[in-house]
Image (tube, rainbow, N blue to C red):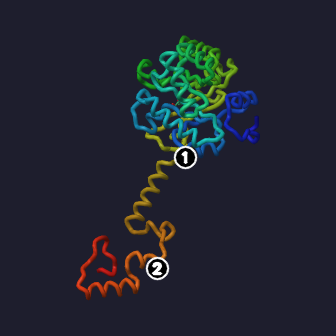
Amino acid sequence: MSATNKPDRRLTVADIHSMHADGERLPMLTAYDYPTARILDDAGIPMLLVGDSLGQVLLGYDSTVRVSMTEMLHHTAAVVRGSKRALVIADMPFLSYSSVDDALANAGRFLREAGATAVKVEGGVRSARTVEALVRAGVPVMGHIGWTPQSQHGMGGKVRVQGKSRETARALLADAIAIQEAGAFSMVLELVPEQLAASITSRLRIPTIGIGAGAGCSGQVQVITDVLGLGDFSPRHARKYADLQATIRSAAEAWAADVRTGNFPGPAETVRMDEQTLDEVLGRTAQDRASADAMASDGMGLGAGIPLDRDL
Ligand code: KIV
C-alpha cells in the first residue's frame, strides 16, 4: 500500500501488515485529545497511540503508574472521535492486565466503550500468556519491550537503555520472539541499542516500532508533546519539530495585552443588534417617553422590574 493509495476508512492491523510488507516505514505518534488527533489523522499518521505517557505529559503525574482505566478510556474515546483513518491503540495502564481475566475485561472496555482498534501491553515473556489470550479473544495487541515504564520501580527506578549486556540482550530477543509468537501485530522497542533493535527487527515477521532504539526498526513512535516542543524536558531520543510552548505563551501574552488595552474584542469578534429593537427593549421610543411623562403627571412612580431608559 503506497502513501498515496491509502483506503478512505479506518486502518486495520491488516493494513499495517501490508504497509510493513511493502517496506514502508511506519510512523506512530501519541495523541490524547480530540483536536490533536484530528490534526494528526489529517496529516496521514497511520497509528495513534493513546499512551499512558498521558499521565506525565498531560495530567502532570510523576509517573505512568498513576494513570487509571477511567482516564485512559476518557482520552482514548476523544482520540477515536478526532480521527477517521488512523488505527487507534490504547495503552493498558498499570495493573489493568495483571491477570488474564482483568486483561480481557479491560481490553474489552477499550474496544467497546472507547472505540479503540487495538491495545498495547508492556512486557515480553512475562506478558506472552496475556497477549495470547487477548489475541485469541479477538483483540489486536501491540507489545512493548525494552524499557517498560510501568515496571520502573522494579527496574531500579532510573530510566535506562535495556539490553546492553549479553544476558539482557538475549533476554530481549527472547521477549521479542515470545510476543510475536503470542500473536501481537507489532511491538514497541523502547530504549534499546541500535544494533540490537535492528537485529531483533530482522528476526521478526511483525513490525517493530522504535523509540530510542535507532533507525533499524520498522517504524518509529514519539510522544507528541516532545515533537511539538510542549514538554517540560526533552529526552535524548526526541527531536523537536515545533516550539508550541513559545507559540502558546506569546499568543496568550498578546491576547491578554489586547484585553488590557481594550483592543479585544474588536468589531470582527462582536455581535450587534438592531438599534430600533434595542430602543424598544430599553423604553427609548417616542411612545415610551410620552407614556412615562403621563405616568409622572398622574403621580405614579417607577414600576417594578428593570428600569428602562424612559424611567431614568
Ligand atoms: O505511553 C507511551 O507514550 C508509550 C510510548 C512511549 C511508546 O508507551
Tell me the kind of residue under disc 1. Pro
**At 45% across and 66% down in the image, what residue appears?**
265
**At 40% across and 64% down in the image, what residue appears?**
259
- Give percent across and percent down for residue 294: 30, 87
Tell me the kind of residue under disc 2. Gln
Element under disc 2 = helix
In front: mark 2 or mark 1? 2
Query: Total marks drawn?
Result: 2
Q: Alpha-carbon distance for marks 2 and 1?
A: 41 Å
Who is closer to the viewer here, 112 or 230?
Answer: 112
| Residue ID for mark 1 | 35
**At 41% across and 23% down in the image, what residue appears?**
157
| Residue ID for mark 2 | 276
- Give percent across and percent down for residue 23: 74, 30
Dividing the picture into quadrants, the one containing residue 43 is top right
Q: Assess mark 1: CB under 8 A from ligand 1?
A: no
Dot 1 alpha-carbon crowd within 10 angstroms: few under 14, some 14 to 19, many 20 or more: some
Going by the image, does 165 lie left or right of 1?
A: left
